[in-house]
């Protein structure tokens, strides 16, 4: 063999060794990142549900506390009313006592009046007996005419007037005393009856107030029991939320570790690819003088451009990065769209490692590829696919077929939704940039 052939063998051997170094990189377990993300999503949904339940419990606790506060205010008002009623009852009792004292005094007055009336009755009876003994009536005219002199007449006239006035006065006083006695009796009895009625009414009111207080007190006890249960349930939910969040953080750490591992694989792939490219250039330089022109193999349906990046699919550039409205209101479009028929080949936009391959919400069937380009990590997204030709952890080259164009997920027709992220992909897509900055369409 000549020197040129020996050099070619050395280059070929170096290429094989370089490839074997790349192939011996630890491969990602199939769909492990997908499974971790799916588990994390379920945990996040559980956290959200727990948060909503905890918020509802907080609302229930607040409403219960407000109800207790309202009831306690009502009970305090009832207590004040009961105190007022007790004070009024005490006042009425004092009035009744004073009225009874008045009645006792009145009884003494009545006894005196009754004695005066009895004495007058006796006097009247004596006067009547005197009248009867004198023939049935006292003839005052005979008394006057029987006077022996004018002076005797005057004396007799004065005596007759005195007797007549005395009789009339006795009768008038007797009638007045009887009337006064009856009026005083009636007044005291009426006053006592009203006071008794007021006392009974207040006693009934106090009984009603006490009954309301007992009823509201029982309701407060019930609310306190409910409050205790609500607080216990809330603590249980908070504990479950804390545990779920802890597991979610563990999953998140695993996702970060898995992404870091895939990024490292992508970096190693970049190193191996650069080494391979250098070796291929050296080989081509060695073969320039002896290479015989051969017909080129048929290329892919997508024209693969030179450089680091290539267009991911053939078709019409149908939607740009930025704000847009497709009928459901204004929204932000985080990528660029290429429209073509279902089944149109979709290729990797650059060398990298598959970090996601499968369905994901509005993306439908989607592939995510992690790239290491000059030490910078990028993630490209290929959404709404009708078919997926790669698996998680698989290394791919720029222009390599990864899937088929489709209209899965939230899509209005067959097209490829293509995103570029500087760094790892995240659900808020905060790292998304305009693909046209890197890829020519």
Image (cartoon, helix red, strand yellow):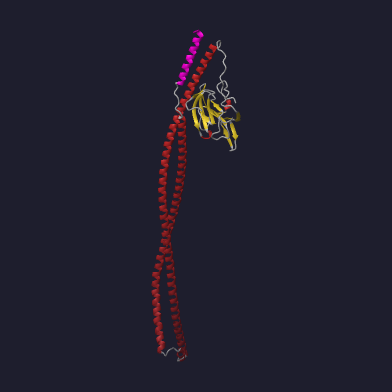
Which residue corresponds to the image point at 39% horizontal and 84% vertical from the top-left?
126
Q: What span is colored magenta in the figure?
A: 1-23
Is 1 drawn above or below residue 157 in the view shown? above
Is 320 drawn above or below residue 148 in the view shown? above
Q: Please indicate, yes or no, whether residue 245 appears anywhere in the rendered image.
A: yes
Is 363 drawn above or below residue 300 in the view shown? below
Q: Quadrant of residue 29?
A: top left
- The foreground one among 152 and 410 is 410
Q: Quadrant of the C terminus?
A: top right
Q: Position of residue 327 (x, y in %)?
A: 60, 37
- The foreground one among 89 and 399 is 399
Q: Position of residue 310 (x, y in %)?
A: 56, 24
| Residue 2 among magenta residues | yes
Instruction: Spot the residue most to the top.
Output: 2
| Residue 67 among magenta residues | no
Q: Would you say the magenta stretch is mainly helix, strand or loop?
A: helix
Which residue corresponds to the image point at 40% horizontal and 87% vertical from the top-left?
130
Which residue corresponds to the image point at 43% horizontal and 38% vertical from the top-left?
241
- The foreground one among 128 and 302 is 302
Is 92 drawn above or below residue 242 in the view shown? below
- The foreground one among 44 and 160 is 44
Which residue corresponds to the image point at 43% horizontal and 39% vertical from the top-left?
238
Q: Position of residue 146 (x, y in %)?
A: 45, 91
Q: Position of residue 180 (x, y in %)?
A: 44, 74
Q: Please indicate, yes or no, whether residue 83 appears anywhere in the rendered image.
A: no
């Amino acid at each position: 063999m000549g020197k040129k052939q020996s050099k070619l063998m050395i280059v070929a051997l170096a290429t094989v060794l370089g490839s074997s170094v790349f192939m011996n990189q630890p491969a990602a377990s199939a769909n492990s990142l997908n499974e971790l993300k799916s588990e994390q999503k379920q945990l996040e949904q559980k956290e959200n549900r727990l948060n909503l339940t905890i918020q509802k419990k907080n609302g229930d606790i607040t409403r219960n506390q407000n109800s207790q506060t309202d009831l306690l205010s009502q009970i305090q008002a009832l207590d004040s009313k009961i105190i007022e009623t007790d004070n009024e009852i005490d006042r009425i009792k004092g009035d009744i006592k004073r009225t009874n004292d008045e009645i006792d005094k009145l009884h003494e007055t009545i006894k005196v009046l009754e004695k005066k009336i009895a004495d007058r009755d006796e006097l009247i009876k004596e006067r009547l007996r005197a009248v009867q003994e004198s023939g049935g009536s006292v003839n005052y005219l005979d008394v006057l005419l029987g006077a022996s002199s004018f002076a005797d007449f005057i004396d007799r006239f004065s005596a007759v007037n005195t007797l007549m006035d005395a009789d009339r006065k006795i009768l008038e006083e007797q009638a007045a005393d009887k009337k006064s006695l009856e009026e005083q009796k009636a007044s005291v009895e009426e006053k006592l009856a009203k006071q008794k009625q007021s006392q009974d009414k207040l006693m009934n009111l106090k009984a009603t107030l006490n009954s309301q207080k007992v009823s509201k007190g029982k309701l407060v006890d019930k609310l306190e029991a409910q409050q205790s249960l609500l607080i216990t349930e809330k603590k249980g939910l908070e504990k479950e939320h804390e545990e779920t969040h802890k597991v979610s953080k563990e999953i998140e750490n695993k996702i970060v570790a898995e992404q870091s591992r895939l990024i490292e694989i992508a970096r190693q792939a970049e190193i191996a690819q650069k080494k391979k490219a250098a070796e291929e250039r050296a080989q081509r330089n060695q073969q320039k003088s002896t290479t015989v022109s051969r017909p080129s193999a048929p290329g892919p349906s997508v024209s693969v451009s030179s450089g680091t990046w290539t267009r991911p699919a053939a078709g019409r550039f149908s939607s740009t990065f930025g704000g847009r409205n497709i009928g459901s209101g204004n929204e932000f479009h985080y990528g660029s769209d290429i429209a073509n028929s279902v089944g149109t080949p979709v290729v990797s936009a650059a060398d990298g490692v598959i970090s996601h391959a499968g369905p994901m919400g509005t993306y439908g069937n989607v592939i995510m590829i992690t790239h290491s380009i000059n030490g910078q990590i990028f993630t490209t997204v290929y959404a709404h696919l009708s078919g997926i030709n790669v698996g998680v952890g698989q290394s791919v080259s720029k222009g390599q077929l990864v899937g088929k164009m489709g209209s899965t997920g939230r899509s209005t027709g067959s097209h490829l939704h293509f995103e570029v992220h500087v760094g790892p992909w995240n659900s808020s897509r905060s790292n998304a940039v305009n693909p046209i900055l890197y890829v020519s369409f």
